[in-house]
Amino acid sequence: MPTPTLAALTEEQQLIVSEVRRFVEKEVLPIATELEHRDEYPAALIDQMKGLGMMGITIPPEYGGLGLPFTTYSAIVEELSRGWMSLGGVINTHAMVSWMINSFGTEEQKRCWLPAMATGEKRAGLCMTEPNAGSDLQAIQMTAVRDGDDYVLNGTKMFVSNGVQGKLFAVLTKTDPRAQPPYSGMTTFIVDKDETPGMTVGRLIEKLGYKGIDTTELFFEDARVPAGNVVGGEEGQGWYHIMATIEIGRINVASRAVGVATAALEDSVRYSKQRRTFGRPIADHQAIQLMLADMATKIEAARLLTRAAAARKDAGERADLWVGMAKLFATEVAQEVSLMALRIHGGYGYTKEMRVERYYRDAPFMLIGEGTNEIQKLVIARNILKMFGE
């Protein structure tokens, strides 16, 4: 099985990542726990992220973005998530939709939407999941029917990140519900919430972790969308757009997992040097050292696998195998490491005084987000079987 190339960051890219780390240390860490416990949208932090260009990380410079590769994007998301995992989520679907438009949209669509997305003036969300369709996206029931120069959209989308704060949404629909196979009748639209009567925000969905980001239902009731908003201008391509774009989401989730795991390790090292039992720091006890060794080794392996997957995407290759492995491994590591961090912190780790309880609540989301890890295993296995069959 060929190994993907792991691209090193350039000096300029390293400086950008360092600037993000300084932002996290100075602006995020002092207030993240308080905002997270209140489940409060971090408006001031998002404004600062816009000023740093984070809404246009991968958008090409000709449309106002930074034009950075996904290897750098992965490192930036990791740093943001080391401070607060929800910040990595804020830019996730935004980056996915901007990449979709840049990769599959018409030139007119790129000029229309990408500049406002690069500045953060228009934040984006992705509408795929429905009440009865999650992992099985071909089972969606939302329809889009052509009516003159418009399409009329009807249906409900669930678990939409940026549902309140977002303005632009990539919405997966069925333009031919009778098509066989079902994916051949699926079409993606870019929908501007401010310009679309009939599109409304439903309830905010309360979650165990992953707080501070607006996760909502979106309702479409005879919502009229111009035909010019069909991504790429052609019906029936929505499935391909989504499957390619979700690779970006899996890079993001894997990077978030590495960030959370890194934060858990750093907090554990710091605490183990300060906490004393039997007259010595607990860092001197072999039981703690064994846990720290396991944590550090698995985190570094997860980081390398995630960057390798990002490099594969940067190369313009099909990357579902690599991003699936990265998402699977990194998120399982984050779950395991966050629990070990809780154990190292003892009773204090179970209180809201320590950040590790937040890591422990955030980690399970990443086992599920952008496709459950059970789905990742199926994707990996099918690719491996096909690869060795050839």
Image: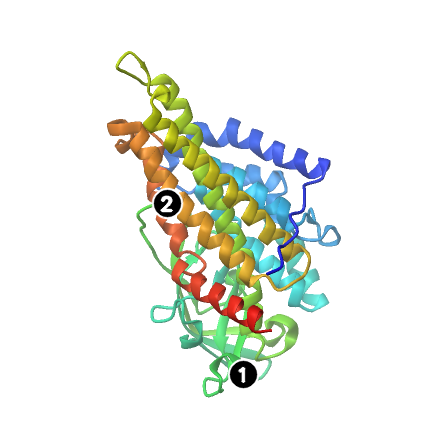
Q: Give neighbour class at mark 1: few <14, some 14-19, many 20+ (Cα, 10 Å).
A: some
Amino acid residing under circle 1: Arg
Quadrant of the drawing holding the N terminus: bottom right
Q: Residue 31 at what x, y percent from top left? A: 42, 30
Amino acid at circle 2: Gln
> Does residue 20 appear to the left or right of 220 in the view shown?
right
Is 330 positioned to the left or the right of 3 in the image? left
Q: Is residue 314 visible?
A: yes
Measuring from the top left, give residue 258's x and y in whole percent.
Answer: 48, 42
| Quarter containing the C terminus | bottom right
> Looking at the image, which is closer to me, 375 or 177?
375
Question: Element at badge 2?
Answer: helix
Q: Can residue 259 be seen by looking at this rendering? A: no
Label 2 crowding class (10 Å Cα cut-off): few <14, some 14-19, many 20+? many
Q: Quadrant of residue 388?
A: bottom right
Q: Nearer the viewer, residue 226 or 290?
A: 290
Q: Residue at x 38, y 31 (%)?
A: 290
Which numbered dot is residue 354? none
What residue appears at the point 62 percent right and 55 percent down from the top-left corner? 3
Most foreground residue, 352 or 277: 277
Q: CA distance from mark 1 to mark 2?
A: 45 Å
Q: What colour scheme was applied to this rendering of the protein? A: rainbow
Q: Which mark is residue 146?
A: 1
The residue identified by callout 2 is 335
Looking at the image, the residue that sits furthest to the right is 62
114 sits to left or right of 33? right
